Amino acid sequence: MNLLDDLEQYLLSIDNEFLDQYIQSEANRLVGTMQKWRDFCSANFFSHGPASDDTIFALRPDWNIDRGGVYDPEMMRQYDELSDELHEKTSDLLEHLNEFRRTAKKRIL
């Protein structure tokens, strides 16, 4: 997440505010989407496996039978819904990043 953190801090810095209102609007929308994505990941990803320098994080490993969770159809259903939500938030993030880049290129060039 370091690259996203760096981009968010860059876009939030008053020193980097865009004078063009369209670019700034897309930057603000992108920052909001990044914050939602990060909040989701922070709330739903947990360390998995043995502790080491290369800690592995997984989406709700306790709900995923492949990650050591118990067989429980309700937990599996909840995991599937969470996985779908992650894909949706990731798609939104990529879409808003691309839209920000497109807008910046169109307005600057």
Image (cartoon, rainbow, N blue to C red):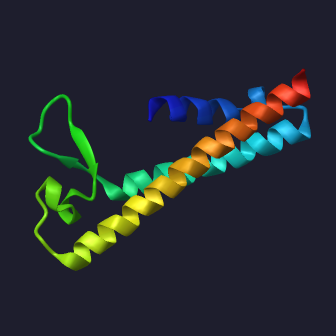
Q: Please report the residue visible at 65 percent of the width from the left and 45 percent of the height from the top.
A: 95
26 versus 79 height, above or below: above
In the displayed orientation, state which residue is furthest to the bottom: 74
Residue 79 sits in quarter: bottom left
Q: Please report the residue visible at 43 percent of the width from the left and 61 percent of the height from the top.
A: 84
In the displayed orientation, state which residue is furthest to the top: 109
Q: Please report the residue visible at 10 percent of the width from the left and 68 percent of the height from the top.
A: 70
8 versus 25 height, above or below: above
| Percent coordinates x, y for residue 26 in the rendering | 77, 43
| Relative depth, front residue between 72 and 10 | 72
Task: Tell me the quadrant of the picture where the C terminus can be found.
Answer: top right
Q: Please report the residue visible at 38 percent of the width from the left and 59 percent of the height from the top.
A: 83
Task: Tell me the quadrant of the picture where the N terminus can be found.
Answer: top left
| Percent coordinates x, y for residue 2 in the rendering | 46, 30
Residue 15 sits in quarter: top right
| Percent coordinates x, y for residue 51 in the rendering | 11, 38
| Percent coordinates x, y for residue 10 in the rendering | 65, 29
93 versus 68 height, above or below: above
Q: Is residue 44 left or right of residue 14?
A: left
The number of callouts visible is: 0
Q: Is residue 15 left or right of residue 39?
A: right
